[in-house]
Amino acid sequence: MSLGRLFFVNRFYWPDEPATAQLLTDLTRGLAAKGWKVVVVTSRPKRDGVPAREVREEVTIERVWTTRLGQRSLIGRALDFVSFYAGAGLALLRSVRRGDAIVALTDPPLIGVLAGWIAAWRGARLFHWVQDIYPEIAVEVTGYRAPLVLRPLRNRAWRRALASVVPGTDMARALRDAGVVADRIAVQPNWAPALLAPAADAVLAALRREWQLEGKFVLAYSGNLGRVHDLEPILDVAAALRDEPDYVVAFIGGGAQRARIEAEVRARGLNNVHFFPAQPRERLAASLGVGDVHFVTLRPGADRWVFPSKLYGIAAIGRPALFIGARDCELAQIVRARGLGASFTRDEAPAAAAQVRGWRNHPAEREAIGTAARAFAGEGAGLAVQAWHNLLTAKLAERGATG
């Protein structure tokens, strides 16, 4: 029996593989299995053969046409956003009816504002799943304050929603500061991709041979090299280890900062730093497993506006996390409190390098971290699906009772 119609709106979904696409895929499949009628409004991938509309694992996927220029320039990225606003808005206007629920994510930025207008027009209910807080994160990255003119619209959309779900308490505080009442904010951590588990030793050995990393202790950064991530300290750690041939740093993925970081590596003569392309989900366990230690970073000032989900994938394959960012931010506190690794500020590269040496020389310590990490990751997608199911059921019933 269907519990009601849920429309999720996000620029990426399966078969695309950004973090929000993977999280949304896991969540919607889980909710559909519980009886919700789930529709995802998303963009069309670049690859051929993906239909504009299909039903997969009981989830209806509506893919709208958009430009895909974002990796080329900021103007191209803006065009991507605008084209998705237009396509997604029309799709929602065609399909959403009174009594439905819309769950807006945050890619593209402020899509929740548009979703709020449509929900009000159609008599639908609005929820937000806040993965990044715009426009503040844009101001932090660019230094330009002009986007803050949009903040009142965003705050109003948050306040009008039945609930907003955030991955951490720092971000929940930002919503409270915007005037969202506490009982309309839910903290639900993200999770590792479903079924992600340590790869077999033979699979790891094969990938190490392919990438010419045999016999190396690998410090990996896996995922988007985006503007919110503080990557220079990773190069500082590499510089501290440059005369020790057993250590290498591996960047796995692409993003806005990759070209600049590659140029910096060349300028600094860091021959112990290597770059590899982003890996498809089916190779994620192997590519994560190649790293003996994994970096997680946030640029100064960004920790309140974003919570990197890569920590959960690192934990699922049982590797230590080396977090570089503000000492008192939520992510650093989780790493320390749950025994997932160690945290350092961006000015502590020598200490971080010393920690890496210690982990290499004490495999038992790495194994203890791995055990704690796998336990932490085991709290993942199943609990999140149940939490979302409970939240949606309670909030929609509450609204139904009040009209």
Image (cartoon, rainbow, N blue to C red):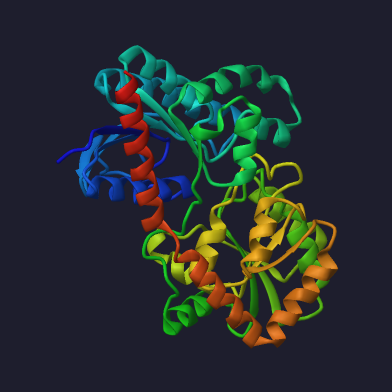
At a point 57% along the width and 37% down the height, the residue shown is 72
At a point 48% along the width and 68% down the height, the residue shown is 316
Q: Which quadrant of the rendered structure holds the N terminus?
A: top left
At a point 64% along the width and 86% down the height, the residue shown is 363
Residue that extends furthest to the front in the rendered view of this protein: 401
How far across and down, in percent of the image, does residue 246 sit?
A: 71, 82
Left or right position of 227 against 163? right
Q: Work out whether residue 91 or residue 241 is closer to the camera in this orientation and state it.
A: 91
Q: How many marks?
A: 0
Q: Is residue 301 above or below residue 41?
A: below
Left or right position of 139 against 128? right
Q: Quadrant of residue 269?
A: bottom right
How far across and down, in percent of the image, does residue 180 sit?
A: 57, 27
- Residue 353 visible somewhere in the drawing: yes
Q: Work out whether residue 76 or residue 2 is closer to the camera in this orientation and state it.
A: 2
Q: Work out whether residue 162 or residue 118 is closer to the camera in this orientation and state it.
A: 162
At a point 41% along the width and 23% down the height, the residue shown is 115
Q: Which quadrant of the rendered structure holds the C terminus?
A: top left
Q: Is residue 350 above or below residue 106?
A: below
